[in-house]
Image: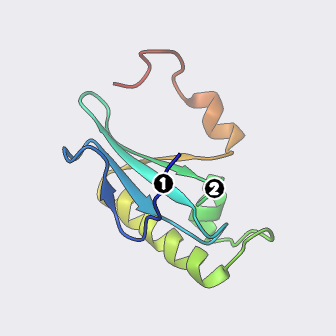
Amino acid sequence: MQTQTIEDEVDLFNDGKIILIPVPGHSAGTIGALVTLDRDGMIFLAADSVSVESNLRAETIPANTWNTDLFARSIATVRNLETRGARIFYGHDAEQWKGLRKGLHAYQ
């Protein structure tokens, strides 16, 4: 399987629907995906770049962070996406999970 290092935003299908965004800090190769859906608009799948909402709101840097400077820059990137209208889906936020719609057609 061929792999590719992502250092800048990558429009996966060149249609603006899925844009991969590097958000390192938690680990060296962390990326998130900005997904634009017809019905639900922009959603940023933050994965481990921002694992819980409290990290974004308080700009808390978790103890298991690989590079704190890059993490802080990535938090700024995620905040900017939110300011532009993206809804953030955190990687491990149990409270958020409770309120998300679930199922095959939950988000479109």
Q: Secondary structure at mark 2?
A: loop
For mark 2, what is the residue?
48
By what rule are the colours in the image chosen? Answer: rainbow
Q: Residue at x 29, y 58 (%)?
A: 84
Q: Is the residue 76 above or below the residue 103 in the image?
A: below
Mark 2 packing: few (<14 Cα in 10 Å), some, or many (20+)?
Answer: some
Does 34 sit left or right of 1 as displayed?
Answer: left
Could you tell me the amino acid type at mark 1? Gly
Disc with the residue nearer the chain's start (1 vs 2): 1
Mark 1 packing: few (<14 Cα in 10 Å), some, or many (20+)?
Answer: many
For mark 1, what is the residue?
32
Residue 66 position, x and y percent, is 72, 74
Q: Is the residue 59 above or below the residue 105 in the image?
A: below
Could you tell me the amino acid type at mark 2? Asp
Q: Residue at x 36, y 69 (%)?
A: 8
Q: Residue at x 36, y 50 (%)?
A: 86
Does 107 sit left or right of 25 as displayed?
Answer: left
Farthest right residue in view:
63
Is 37 in front, or is 18? 18
Disc 1 from disc 2: Cα separation: 8 Å
Farthest bottom residue in view:
69
Q: Which mark is residue 88?
A: none
Q: Secondary structure at mark 1?
A: strand
Q: Is the residue 28 above or below the residue 69 in the image?
A: above
Counting labels gives 2
Residue 80 position, x and y percent, is 37, 66
Residue 83 position, x and y percent, is 34, 61
Is 48 in front, or is 27? 27
Q: Is the residue 49 above or below the residue 73 in the image?
A: above
Location of residue 62 (image quadrant) = bottom right
